[in-house]
Amino acid sequence: MIAVVKNTATPEQIAHFVGWIESKGLKTDISRGDNTTIIGLVGDTTLIDPYLIEGMDIVERVQRVSEPFKKANRKFHPHDTVIDCGRGVLVGAGHFQVIAGPCSVEGESLIRIAREVKAAGATMLRGGAYKPRTSPYSYQGMGTEGLDLLCEARAELDMPVVTEIMDPRDVGAFLDRKIEVWQIGARNSQNFPLLKEVGKTDAVILLKRGIAGTIDELLMAAEYVMSEGNPNVIVCERGIRSFETRTRNTFDLNAVPVLHDLTHLPVCADPSHATGHTRYVGPMALAATAAGADCLEIEVHDDPKHAWSDGAQALTPAQFADTMTRVAKVREAIMMEVE
């Protein structure tokens, strides 16, 4: 349920109203716009008579919200959220960013690749220190040593880093190293203890859609994080499993505008995992940009044939630079005013 407050309401009246709502055992979520203040009621709203609220002097109208996700819901927060990823990098509400780097941290090659992607226009550096793999015998990542290498690259290039967290027990290591963006991968998108634990921090969470997850399940995963107090969530479409076998996954491009319609959170797109093939990554990066994605995540490796993981979907630095040029042209085209 949401209550739209009249623009004549004073801060004292709003505070009194919020206190009354919370005394009934509900939580509140306040969104203040230029002309409208919306107060979301989160919890068992059957405890409160909506007609009683609507009759209050400061309330313009009351509206029920049927979706189970409340804090992530655009109805509660009609204005796009801007997420501060650190070092001056903002995502959302017109702030567009590109995350790039190798699938996994492989040692000193990381800094070399990082320099290349930054020169091409990437604003955040990705690299997996912990790798979720289908086979227990596949490369699992460098662990804390990989985190340290990411921190070294960050220090030289002044770029926020993006890396995956898989275990609630690793939260301390991420906090100690001040990792800016914590990625929750597709396999952990419904790892609820992990979602709750990262929700207790103020880190930026890049939350990927599950391998066979619906859009609503993605938003409910975001709700898990936000319900613990962390509002800094970016939702990411990375392809879903379908009957098609020509690509690694099926890139649900529909998800970009649908998510923008349903949530105020920034929307990222990952064409690398979505397609699984280098030759398709560039075209789908352009398509996601045109569809309105706030952010792209692209895998880049300077020697894909010898990459320790997912080399088949990595762009070379030259291919990435070309894609960035094309992305800029698409951005310019969609930002032009229609005469």
Image (spheres, rainbow, N blue to C red):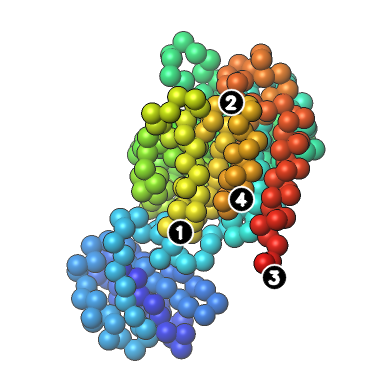
Up the image or down, 20 lies above or below 278; here it is: below
Q: Position of residue 93 (x, y in %)?
A: 59, 60
Q: Which residue is mark 1?
A: 261
Q: CA distance from mark 4 to mark 1?
A: 16 Å
30 and 249: which is toward the camera: 249
In space, the residues marked 4 and 2 are separated at their CA atoms by: 20 Å
Residue 198: image quadrant is top left
**Mark 4 to mark 3: distance in Å?**
19 Å
The tag earlier along the polypeptide, 1 or 3, is 1
Mark 3 neighbour density, 10 Å: few (under 14) some (14–19) many (20 or more): few
Which labelled disc corresponds to residue 277? Answer: 2
| Circle nearer the N terminus (2, 3) | 2
Q: CA distance from mark 2 to mark 1?
A: 29 Å
Tell me, for residue 339, which label it has, or none: 3
Q: Residues within 10 Å of mark 2 (few under 14, many from 20)?
A: many
For badge 2, the amino acid type reads His
Q: Distance of mark 2 from mark 3, alpha carbons? A: 38 Å
Residue 180 location, x and y as percent? 60, 43
Q: Residue at x 72, y 55 (%)?
A: 332
Tell me the element at label 4: helix
Q: Is residue 328 visible?
A: yes
Is residue 306 toward the left or the right of residue 195 in the image? right
Numbered circle sitting on residue 30: none
Q: Which residue sits at x=63%, y=38%? A: 283
Which residue is at a point 67% across and 19% down the rendered structure image? 304
Residue at 35 percent across and 83 percent down: it is 59
Depicted 332 relative to depicted 301: above or below: below
Q: Which residue is more in the foreground, 332 or 302?
A: 332
Camera-nearest residue between 122 and 283: 283
Q: Residue furthest top?
A: 137
Q: CA distance from mark 1 to mark 3?
A: 25 Å
